[in-house]
Amino acid sequence: MNTAPNVFTDVFSGAKLGPVTLRNRIIKAATFEASTPDALVTDDLITYHRLPAAGGVGMTTVAYCAVTPGGRTEGKQIWMRPEAVPGLRKLTDAIHAEGAAISAQIGHAGPVADSRSNKATALAPVRFFNPIAMKFAKKATRDDIDDVIEAHANAARIAIDAGFDAVEIHLGHNYFASSFLSPLINRRTDEFGGSLENRAKVARGMVLAVRRAVNDQIAVTAKLNMSDGVRGGISLDESLQTAKWLEEDGGLDAIELTAGSSLVNPMYLFRGDAPVKEFAGAFKPPMRWGVRMMGRKFLREYPYREAYLLRDAKKFRAELTMPLILLGGITNKETMDLAMAEGFDFVAMGRALLAEPDLINRIKADASVRSRCTHCNQCMPTIYSHTHCVVTGAPDHVPAS
Ligand SMILES: Cc1cc2nc3c(=O)[nH]c(=O)nc-3n(C[C@H](O)[C@H](O)[C@H](O)COP(=O)(O)O)c2cc1C
């Protein structure tokens, strides 16, 4: 349960996340690693997470463990299957040895899935063109929806077998569940379209299926869009209602609040510089030329500021009692303290920990330490090769502190 806003909550104090106790309230947010060429754990992936674990986070999040092969944003991503368990177990053991917990982000990318590299059909609320795959996602049937929901439960069971402490269900960024929530994308007229109650059925169904599968063996969190940042997309009011239902359903131990759409407005997630040239460079012609020409429309620039999602997140904090995780532009101790003072139970950090995996230990030793992340966002296109920070070289070259 969330305690009332309290300026004295120390971000470095231990905290319960459902059945799990974290050594502090700082979570490494999912940043897709691009370290799994055979869709299985590699030593590279282990290093990627061992560094922030050794660097002091309470919990690290393995990005995008897809629930089915067709639910991946590209065909080299791990999908949760028995064959992946021995490698995942090696990974969770390595993180536990550093004193941190580890969560698996489980999800289905829906219209964002790359059916070409997955060699499997993508699914969406309606037939939908994916410009990266240059293919259409199929309109999901009722059976497809049931299968995706059940696949989330299976993925959570696999996470338990592999030694994870938590799963984070992806309900954001216009992936499968989020695309159903979006009135812009979800134009269905059946029981999954129309009213918010109908559009929220997939997200709520996934959470309850996962909860039933895990009981209280591990923690269950969700990453939920507060808004898509797109006219006609998921709005703050609708998302708040969805969050209230998720709270009432009782399936979640915490919600991590995010925003933006990988499909139509990715920069709303990040803020800061839009790396159009570098993004285009990640593709081969003619896609490269298309991205160069259309890039500014797709990668819109938004000013960056610390805790840029706080204003919206406070509206959720005011109306919900369950634990909430603040994300977006958290890079230093003052911002962490602000998040605690505003009543958030945890903070999640992406880019700053990608740039400097040891940042948390350094902040703990000296609260005046500042992040070297410049929110240039050039780490973003590196997800198409091998994710790293172009400023510090981490995680391949651990920056000297
Ligand atoms: C290189 C990179 C990869 C990312 N991959 C994922 C991902 O796989 N899943 C996800 O939910 N968010 C992903 N994100 C978004 C982050 O989790 C986070 O929401 C975002 O970076 C904002 O937090 P920050 O300001 O602390 O970086 C990614 C971000 C970056 C920079």
Image: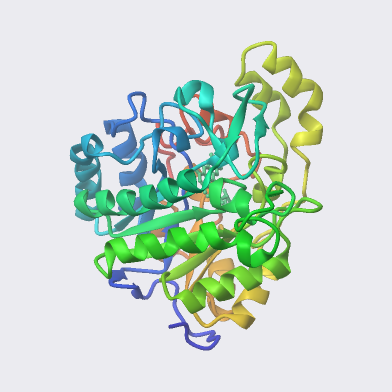
Scheme of image coloration = rainbow
- Residue 113: image x %, image y %? 54, 34
- Report if residue 227 is visible in the image: yes
- Where does residue 6 sit, x and y in percent of width and height? 53, 86
Quick check: can you spot residue 61? no
Please tell me which residue is depicted at 60% across the width and 21% down the height of the picture. Answer: 282
Task: Locate residue 28: give its quadrant.
Answer: bottom left
Quadrant placement of the N terminus: bottom left
Question: Residue lying furthest top in this view?
Answer: 285
The reply, left or right, for residue 393 in relation to residue 319 is: left
Q: Position of residue 220 (x, y in %)?
A: 38, 64
| Picture quadrant where residue 5 is located | bottom right
Kindly identify the residue that appears in the image at 36 percent across and 29 percent down.
36
Residue sitting at x 42%, y 69%: 252
Residue 231 pos. (x, y %): 81, 52
Q: Quadrant of residue 312?
A: bottom right
Above or below, 89 relative to 207:
above
Q: Viewer-proximal residue, 281 or 152? A: 152
Between 178 and 390, the one lying in front of the other is 178
Q: Is residue 313 left or right of residue 103?
A: right
Would you say 2 lies left or right of 44 here? Answer: right
Camera-nearest residue between 361 and 138: 138
